Image (spheres, rainbow, N blue to C red):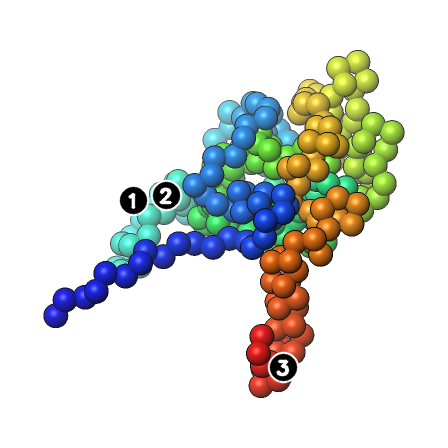
Amino acid sequence: MKVKNMTAYKRQFYPGASSPAKNRRRYMDPKVKLKKIRDVSMDDVVRLMGHRNPGEDYKSIHPPIQEGKEPNCPIRKLVEPIDGAKHGDRIRYIQFTDSVYFAPISPYQRAWMYLSRERGVDTGTLSGRQIIEVRERDLERMAKELIDNETFDPALTGIRGATVHGHACRLDENGLMFDAWQRYVWDDKKKEVVYVKDQVAVPLDRKIYVGKPASMADLKKRTTIFRADGVDMRDDKEVTAYGLRIHKLRTLGGYQPFNVKDV
């Protein structure tokens, strides 16, 4: 019996024709190579996270997979382990805080992006923060990419492992998002943001510069955030219809799915 050719499945990421909707699709689509804006060294990325010293061996929680004696498993044969899992690395994390004032991306869109672009990750979202947990050497690669690329802005994105509050506070005179621990400060001479503490506010033995903040005009083009003083979600009919449908399904369908009709 011949099987008819079926149209290849095409992934759908997000509706809408507005700039935030387009940015959401770009950030989520693993085929899109995100623009690299800065180049923070890997050693400095390691210092910012604070899990190990640059050059120090990775700590492990189990032997390398090839040396282990795991039971036969068909799924294990199908799924290629990520590099850290192959080596038995422990699981570590990095956490970002994104300002509501036109940061390039917001926490729950980070979750979409991580899960769409990477494997072997665990991620959690709160109002202004987004944590990602993964094997250590994979985390360091991902962290460097996330700090270097267009989803990070030195003034409106904070690397904060603890006491993350400040995303909804007003920006200071230099346009920086509030940080209770002052992990980063403004260098008035270089006009750049510099980290003086790691993500859990332990003082660093050297300053780490992460570059100049983007202009507000540029940020409004790059952001995934809908705002009444930027691009209003209500101006994008496709996004509004999608959002209202999801809200209605979640509200009516939580405990009474039989009430959900014509949605």
The image's mark for residue 223 is none
In-image side of 235 versus 249 (left or right)? right
Q: Locate residue 243: give its quadrant.
A: bottom right
State which mark lies toward you, 1 or 2.
2
Classify the position of the C terminus by image quarter. bottom right
Nearer-N-terminus badge (2/3): 2
Residues under numbered marks 1 and 2 in contact, where contact means CB atoms less than 8 Å apart: yes
**Distance Cα–Cα, label 2 vs label 3:** 42 Å
In-image side of 89 versus 215 (left or right)? left
In the rendered view, would you say 221 is above or below 107? above
Residue 8, percent from left and from top: 32, 56
* Residue drawn at x 73%, y 41% as measured from the top left: 102
**Distance Cα–Cα, label 3 vs label 1:** 47 Å
Residue under label 2, please give it: 86
Residue 216, percent from left and from top: 75, 32
What residue occupies the far left of the structure in this picture? 1
Which element is circle 2 on? helix
Q: Amino acid at mark 1?
A: Gln
The image's mark for residue 255 is 3
Classify the position of the N terminus by image quarter. bottom left
State which mark lies toward you, 2 or 3.
3
In-image side of 257 versus 30 (left or right)? right
Say few, some or many: other residues with alpha carbon within 10 Å of mark 3 (under 14 / 14 to 19 / 20 or more).
few
**Distance Cα–Cα, label 1 vs label 2:** 7 Å
Regarding residue 226, the answer to whether it shows in the image is: yes
Which element is circle 1 on? helix
Q: Locate residue 41: give its quadrant.
A: top right
Residue 191, percent from left and from top: 76, 18
Nearer-N-terminus badge (1/2): 1
Q: Locate residue 202: give its quadrant.
A: top right
Residue under label 1, please give it: 66
